[in-house]
C-alpha cells in the first residue's frame, strides 16, 4: 500500500528488503519506483466566510449564526458558513416565490435554457478551481473531483439546458407545468454533483429553488452561486441556505414548497416522509443502498476486479450505489480474493490534493467512527478482514481500504450500509441463488453483474430489484441515464426524461 | 485627409474544412446596385469532391457522443452570436428591404441552440424498448442515414439554410449543401463561422453556384443517401425521380408557397434522416 | 479440428475473455499518474536501459548499423546517461552489429522467421534463425503464424514457436503476436498463453512488428501484462514483455512503465523483464533528461541521430 505523504522514500520500510526473498509466485509491489508527492497547487479561491445566498446576493444569517467548515484531509479550518434558521429559510422561500411569479415563470423555455448553458460553460471555465475546492472541502481525491465530479456536474447543466424548451415532449399526450417552488436537501458525498443533479432539472422544468447543501460540504455550492451571479441568473431563482439538520427540516417542511427532493440516508428520508405525511407535498427520495456486485466464473476477471475495486473504493466508498457486497461464484472465490488483494497493493491512500492519491479522506470524524465500529463488528462476528499495510497521515480522517471475506447474509457488515471503503465478500453457487442473496435486503438502489454471457446479463437484470443495474461495468453515470432506487432506497428518478418528469406537474 | 481603402474579401466555399474556389475557377457576381463580390460558381465535380470530404468526416462525426455534438453546436452558436451584426448585413443583401435581417439572425441563433439541445435526447424519444411476446430483449436504436444533401431556398438565406442543415447533423449525419443562388453571401460567412466552431472539417460542406447545374448532381449522386430540399414543382419531380434510382430518403418543401422559417423546428425534422435498427437478444440463464 | 487443437482451444477459453471497454478504462488511469522530480528521472533513465534500439529498413547498410550501434553505446554527451539494452536489426546485419557492440554489454537482437509477415516455409524460417544465432544474435524476435491462429490451428502456432525456440539455443526468444492482425483483446490474451506455455523464464512476448498501421498501445500492453501475471501466478514461470512500435515520446514510455509497476510490480521494472522496441523514443527520453538537468526545454537537433531537420 502506498501513501501519498511527503515522507522521503528512504525512511519508509522497503518491501524488497524483507528477510525472506519473494516466493516463487509472489509479485512485489514495493518502493523500487516511488512516486514523488504531486500536490495540486491551483488556488481554490475560498472566501474566509460565506453568507447565505438569497435573492441573488450573499447576506449573513438574520440572527448572525455561523459555524466553521474544516478540511477532513488535514482538519484545518477552511471557512465560516452562515447558520440559517427558520426565518432565513422563510426569506429564501419568499425570494424563490417572487422570482417564480414575476420572472422565471414568464420566461420562454429557450431563454431559461440559455441560463443553464451559461452556467455549464462558466463552470467549465473554472473547472480546476472548483475541483480543488471540492477535494479540500470533502476529502475526495483531486483526481476524482477533476476527472469526474466537476465535468459531470457541468454536463448535467448542459444536458438539462436543452430540455427547457422541449417540455411538451416529456409526457406524450399531456402538457406539463412547473411546480413553482421546490425545496431540496443534498448530501456530502458528491457536493457539487448532487447540487447539479437537483438544480439543473428543477430549473429546466421552470421551477425556482431553495436548496440546502450538507453542513460539512457547502463550499462548492456557494462558489456556484458566484457563477449564478456571473451568468446573470435572475435573483431568487436559486437560493442556497447553509446549516445542519434543523435547517434541512425547515427547508423540507416549508409551506411554499410544492415539491421537495431529498438525497441522504434512508433513516433521515423516512423521518422527512413522516413529517410531510398528509401535507400533499410531492416528494422524491434518493436514499441508501447495499448493492450486490455479482461475479460469475465466466466473467472477464481482470476487468471484474477493476469493477469491484472501483465499485467500493471510488470516493472512499461514500457512494449510495457502492458495490459494497461482492457476490462471487464459489468456484472462483479464492482466485478473486487473491486478485483483489494484489490489486489493492497499488492503491494509494493519502492527501486528497496529491494527484496520485486514489483514496482520500473520510468526510468527517463521525463517519470515520461509524466505519470503524462496523468494521469491528465484522471482525467480532467472525468475518476475515484484509487491509494492506499503509501509513495513514497523522492529521485528518483516514481509513485503509478493507475487504472482508467469509461473510454471510446475517453479518451486520452484509446488511448495514457502511458508507466507507469496506467490501464484504459472500459466495453463491447458481444464478438463482445470486438473485436471492442480492435481493435479500430492504435496499434496492443498484447492482452489478459480471459475466461473458449476454442472455444471462439480461435475465439477471430483469430479476434484480435495483433501480440501476451495471453489467460488466460499475459506477457509470450520465445526465441522460435515469438514476434512483427500489424499495427503501427511495423513489423518483434523476437524469433523463424520467428524471425531468419528476419536476413537472401533469396538466 | 484621404479615407482608408478597406481590404475586400474574396468569397470562398467551405468544403472539407478548408476554403476553396470552384475547381472550374468560374465565379458569378452579386450586385446590390453596385458590385458586391464574385461568388464561386461550383460544378458537379465540386459536388463530387464535397461528397468525398463528407464521406471522410462521416464515421468520426457519427461516433461522437450526443453530448459532444451538442457542445460543438453550442460553440457554433457562440461563434455566430459574436458576428450577429455582420450576418444581418449579409442577410439583407438581395432582400429588397423586405424581411427583418436582425430577427432572422436571432432566430438562427435560437435554432442552433434548439438542435444543440436535442443531440443527447432524441434517442430517448425516437428509440424504444419493445415489449415482444417472447423471451427476448428487443430494442430499437436510431442511426444517422449518412451523407445528406441540402438545397436551400432564396428566402431567409441564413435561417432556412441552417434550419435544413441542423436537424440533419444533430443525429450524426454529414451534409453537402447548396446555398441560395441569388443570396449566397450568408453561406460564405457561415462557412467561416463553422470553421471556428470545433465542427470537424467535412461535416458540413457549403457550395454556391447555379441550381440548374448543381441540383441534378446532388439528386443522382448515389453516395448521398438523403436529401432535404426547398424546390419548385419541376425540381421536386427531378429530385424524387432521381432519388428512386438509389432509394434516397427525400424530403421536400414547395418553394412556391411561403414557409414560416421562424417556427420551422421539430423533432420530426431529426427523425426524417435517421434509420431504425431493431435488435433481439434472448433473456435467459 | 484435431484433438490437440480442441484441447488448446479449451485451455485458451479457461483463461477467459477481456472486456475491451474495461481494459481501456484501466489503462486510462495510468495516464493520470503524476510523475515528477526524482520519480521522473528514475523512470526516464530506466526507460533508456530498456530500449531495443531498432533499425528495420530495406535500405539498411553496414554504415547505418555502425551509427546505430554507436548511438546505442553512447546515447548522449554525459556519462551519467546509461546505455540501451540492445540493438535490433535484420538477420543480414547481425554480424555488422555484433562487431560494434561486442564487449559493451549491449545485446544484439535479430528479427527472424520471415519478419514481418512470416509467410514462408517453416524450414526457411528456422534456417534464418540458426544463421542469425551463428552470426552472434543474443536474442531472436520471431513472428507467430497469424494465419494458423485465426483459422483455429493453435497446435501449429505453438509447435512453430517451440521449434524456433530449439533453433535459438541459448539465445533469448521474443515472440511477436502482431496485435493489429489478431485484432481483439481476447485473441491477444489467447495467443499470449499459447506462446508462454512453451517459453523459458525471461523469454519475451512482444506486441508487434512495427510494420503495420497499429502497434503497441497501453491497452494491448495491458492485456499481455495481465496474461504474464496470471501465467506467473499459475506456474511460477516469469515471462518478459516488449511493446514495440508507436511509442515515440518519453511521456508515453512513462505511462507504459506505470502499467508495469501496477500490474507486475518491482521485479519487472528492469531490462531483463521489459523492453521498448523503439527508435525515436531514445532521443525524446534524452531530451527530457536534459531538460530536467538544465531546466530548459531542448531542441531536437542537439541530439545525435535526430529525426527530421527543422
Image: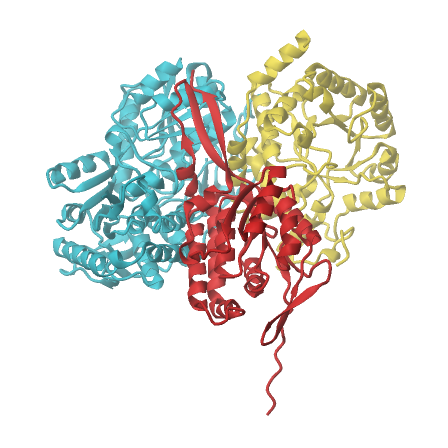
What residue is shown at x 32% (from left), y 59% (from top)? A228
Write down the quadrant of residue A140 in the picture.
Answer: top left
Whether residue C99 sits left or right of residue A296 in the image: it is right
Asked if residue C310 lies left or right of residue B210, the reply is: right
**Image quadrant of residue B131?**
top left
Q: Where is C43 relative to A267, above or below?
A: below
- Quadrant holding the N terminus of chain C: top right
Which residue is at 42% across, 42% downward?
A: B122
Q: Which chain does the red colour mark? A: B
Between A172 and C197, the one lying in front of the other is A172
The answer to whether residue B29 is left or right of residue A97 is right
Q: How many numbered tags mark residues here?
A: 0
On the question of residue C31 being in view, the answer is no
* Residue A212 can be seen in this image: yes
Q: Position of residue B23 (x, y in %)?
A: 72, 58
- Give x and y (percent) for residue B26: 71, 63
Chain that is coloured yellow in the picture? C
Looking at the image, the residue that sits furthest to the front is B234
In the rendered image, which quarter is residue C97 located in? top right
Seen in the picture, residue C226 relative to C48 is either above or below; the reply is: above
x and y percent of residue A264 in the render? 25, 39
> Considering depth in this image, is C114 or B285 the residue closer to the camera?
B285
Check the image and name the residue furthest to the top. Answer: C3
Amino acid at each position: 500500500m502506498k501513501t501519498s505523504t511527503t515522507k522521503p522514500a528512504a525512511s519508509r520500510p522497503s518491501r524488497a528488503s524483507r528477510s525472506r526473498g519473494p516466493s516463487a509466485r509472489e509479485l512485489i509491489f514495493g518502493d523500487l519506483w516511488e512516486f514523488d508527492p504531486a500536490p495540486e497547487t491551483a488556488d481554490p479561491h475560498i472566501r474566509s466566510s460565506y453568507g447565505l445566498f438569497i435573492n441573488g446576493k450573499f447576506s449573513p444569517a438574520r440572527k448572525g449564526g455561523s459555524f466553521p467548515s474544516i478540511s477532513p484531509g488535514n482538519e484545518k479550518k477552511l471557512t465560516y458558513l452562515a447558520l440559517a434558521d427558520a426565518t432565513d429559510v422563510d426569506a429564501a422561500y419568499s425570494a424563490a416565490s417572487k422570482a417564480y411569479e414575476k420572472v422565471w415563470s414568464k420566461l420562454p423555455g429557450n431563454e431559461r435554457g440559455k441560463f443553464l448553458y451559461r452556467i455549464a460553460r462558466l463552470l467549465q471555465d473554472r473547472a480546476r478551481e472548483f475541483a480543488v475546492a471540492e477535494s479540500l472541502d470533502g476529502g475526495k481525491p483531486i483526481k476524482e473531483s477533476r476527472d469526474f465530479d466537476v465535468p459531470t456536474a457541468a454536463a448535467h447543466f448542459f444536458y438539462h439546458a436543452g430540455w427547457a424548451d422541449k417540455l411538451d415532449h416529456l409526457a406524450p399526450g399531456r402538457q406539463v407545468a412547473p411546480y413553482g417552488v421546490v425545496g431540496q436537501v443534498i448530501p456530502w458525498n458528491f457536493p457539487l454533483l448532487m447540487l447539479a443533479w437537483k438544480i439543473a432539472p428543477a430549473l429546466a422544468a421552470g421551477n425556482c429553488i431553495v436548496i440546502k447543501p450538507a453542513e460539512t460540504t457547502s463550499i462548492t455550492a456557494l462558489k456556484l452561486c458566484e457563477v449564478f451571479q456571473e451568468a446573470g441568473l435572475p435573483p431568487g431563482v436559486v437560493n442556497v441556505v447553509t446549516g445542519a439538520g434543523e435547517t434541512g427540516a425547515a427547508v423540507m417542511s416549508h409551506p411554499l414548497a410544492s415539491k421537495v427532493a431529498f438525497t441522504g440516508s434512508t433513516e433521515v428520508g423516512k423521518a422527512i416522509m413522516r413529517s410531510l405525511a398528509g401535507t400533499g407535498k410531492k416528494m422524491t427520495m434518493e436514499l441508501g443502498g447495499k448493492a450486490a456486485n455479482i461475479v460469475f466464473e465466466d466473467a472477464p476477471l481482470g476487468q471484474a476486479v477493476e469493477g469491484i475495486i472501483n465499485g467500493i473504493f471510488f470516493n472512499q466508498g461514500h457512494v449510495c450505489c457502492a458495490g459494497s457486497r461482492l457476490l462471487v461464484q464459489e468456484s472462483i472465490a479464492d482466485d478473486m480474493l487473491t486478485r483483489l488483494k494484489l490489486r489493492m497493493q497499488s492503491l494509494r491512500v493519502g492527501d486528497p490534493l496529491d494527484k496520485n492519491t486514489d483514496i482520500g479522506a473520510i468526510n468527517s470524524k463521525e463517519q470515520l467512527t461509524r466505519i470503524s465500529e462496523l468494521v469491528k463488528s465484522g471482525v467480532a462476528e467472525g468475518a476475515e478482514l484484509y487491509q494492506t499495510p499503509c501509513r495513514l497521515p497523522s492529521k485528518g480522517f483516514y481509513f485503509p481500504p478493507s475487504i472482508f471475506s467469509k461473510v454471510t447474509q446475517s453479518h451486520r457488515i452484509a446488511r448495514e450500509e457502511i458508507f466507507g471503503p469496506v467490501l464484504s465478500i459472500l459466495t453463491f453457487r447458481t444464478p438463482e441463488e445470486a438473485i436471492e442473496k442480492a435481493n435479500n435486503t430492504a435496499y434496492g438502489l443498484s447492482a452489478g453483474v459480471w459475466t461473458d454471457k449476454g442472455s444471462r446479463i439480461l435475465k439477471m437484470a430483469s430479476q434484480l430489484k435495483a433501480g440501476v443495474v451495471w453489467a460488466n461495468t460499475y459506477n457509470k453515470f450520465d445526465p441522460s441515464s435515469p438514476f434512483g432506487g427500489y424499495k427503501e432506497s427511495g423513489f423518483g428518478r434523476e437524469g433523463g426524461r424520467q428524471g425531468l418528469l419528476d419536476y413537472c406537474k401533469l396538466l | 485627409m484621404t479615407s482608408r481603402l478597406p481590404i475586400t474579401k474574396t468569397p470562398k466555399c467551405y468544403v472539407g474544412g478548408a476554403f476553396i474556389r470552384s475547381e472550374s475557377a468560374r465565379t458569378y457576381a452579386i450586385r446590390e446596385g453596385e458590385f458586391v463580390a464574385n461568388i464561386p460558381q461550383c460544378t458537379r465535380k465540386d459536388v463530387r469532391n464535397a461528397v468525398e470530404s463528407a464521406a471522410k468526416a462521416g464515421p468520426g462525426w457519427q461516433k461522437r457522443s450526443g453530448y459532444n455534438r451538442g457542445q460543438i453546436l453550442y460553440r457554433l452558436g457562440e461563434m455566430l452570436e459574436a458576428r450577429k451584426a455582420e450576418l444581418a448585413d449579409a442577410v439583407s443583401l438581395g432582400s429588397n428591404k423586405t424581411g427583418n435581417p436582425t430577427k432572422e439572425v436571432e432566430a438562427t441563433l435560437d435554432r442552433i441552440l434548439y438542435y444543440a439541445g436535442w443531440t443527447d435526447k432524441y434517442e430517448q424519444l425516437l428509440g424504444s424498448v419493445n415489449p415482444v411476446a417472447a423471451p427476448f430483449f428487443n430494442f430499437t436504436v436510431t442511426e444517422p442515414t449518412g451523407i445528406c444533401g441540402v438545397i436551400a431556398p432564396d428566402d431567409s438565406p441564413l435561417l432556412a439554410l441552417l434550419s435544413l442543415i441542423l436537424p440533419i447533423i444533430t443525429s450524426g449525419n454529414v451534409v453537402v449543401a447548396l446555398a441560395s443562388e441569388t443570396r449566397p453571401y450568408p453561406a460564405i460567412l457561415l462557412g467561416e463561422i463553422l470553421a471556428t466552431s470545433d465542427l470537424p472539417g467535412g461535416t458540413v460542406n457549403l457550395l454556391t453556384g447555379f441550381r440548374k447545374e448543381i441540383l441534378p448532381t446532388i439528386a443522382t449522386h448515389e453516395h448521398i443517401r438523403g436529401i432535404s430540399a426547398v424546390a419548385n414543382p419541376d425540381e421536386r419531380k427531378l429530385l424524387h425521380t432521381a432519388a428512386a434510382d438509389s432509394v434516397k430518403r427525400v424530403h421536400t418543401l414547395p418553394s412556391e408557397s411561403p414557409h414560416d422559417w421562424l417556427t420551422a423546428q421539430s423533432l420530426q425534422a431529426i427523425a426524417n434522416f435517421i434509420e431504425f435498427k431493431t435488435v433481439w437478444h434472448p433473456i435467459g440463464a | 479440428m484435431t484433438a490437440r487443437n480442441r484441447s488448446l482451444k479449451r485451455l485458451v477459453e479457461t483463461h477467459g475473455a477481456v472486456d475491451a471497454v474495461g481494459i481501456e478504462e484501466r489503462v486510462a488511469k495510468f495516464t493520470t499518474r503524476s510523475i515528477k522530480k526524482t520519480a521522473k528521472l528514475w523512470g526516464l533513465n530506466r526507460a533508456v536501459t530498456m530500449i531495443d534500439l531498432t533499425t528495420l529498413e530495406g535500405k539498411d547498410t553496414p554504415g547505418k548499423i555502425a551509427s546505430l550501434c554507436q548511438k546505442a553505446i553512447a546515447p548522449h554527451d554525459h556519462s551519467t546517461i546509461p546505455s540501451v539494452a540492445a540493438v535490433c536489426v535484420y538477420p543480414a546485419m547481425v554480424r555488422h552489429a555484433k562487431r560494434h557492440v561486442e564487449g559493451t554489454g549491449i545485446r544484439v537482437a535479430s528479427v527472424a522467421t520471415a519478419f514481418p509477415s512470416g509467410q514462408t516455409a517453416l524450414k526457411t524460417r528456422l534456417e534464418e534463425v540458426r544463421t542469425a544465432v551463428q552470426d552472434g544474435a543474443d536474442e531472436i524476435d520471431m513472428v507467430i503464424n497469424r494465419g494458423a491462429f485465426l483459422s483455429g490451428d493453435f497446435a501449429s502456432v505453438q509447435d512453430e514457436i517451440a521449434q524456433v525456440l530449439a533453433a535459438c539455443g541459448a539465445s533469448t526468444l521474443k515472440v511477436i503476436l502482431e496485435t493489429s492482425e489478431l485484432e481483439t483483446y481476447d485473441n491477444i490474451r489467447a495467443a499470449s498463453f499459447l506462446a508462454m506455455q512453451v517459453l523459458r523464464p525471461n523469454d519475451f512476448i512482444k506486441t508487434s512488428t512495427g510494420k503495420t498501421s497499429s502497434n503497441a498501445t497501453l491497452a494491448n500492453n495491458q492485456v499481455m501484462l495481465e496474461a504474464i501475471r496470471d501465467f506467473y501466478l499459475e506456474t511460477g514461470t516469469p515471462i518478459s514483455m516488449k511493446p514495440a512500435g508507436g511509442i515515440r515520446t518519453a511521456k508515453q514510455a512513462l505511462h507504459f512503465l506505470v502499467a508495469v509497476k501496477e500490474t507486475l510490480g518491482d521485479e519487472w521494472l528492469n531490462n531483463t523483464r521489459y523492453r521498448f522496441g523503439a527508435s525515436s523514443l531514445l532521443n525524446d527520453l534524452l531530451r527530457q533528461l536534459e531538460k530536467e538537468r538544465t531546466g530548459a526545454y531542448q531542441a531536437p537537433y542537439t541530439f545525435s541521430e535526430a529525426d527530421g531537420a527543422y
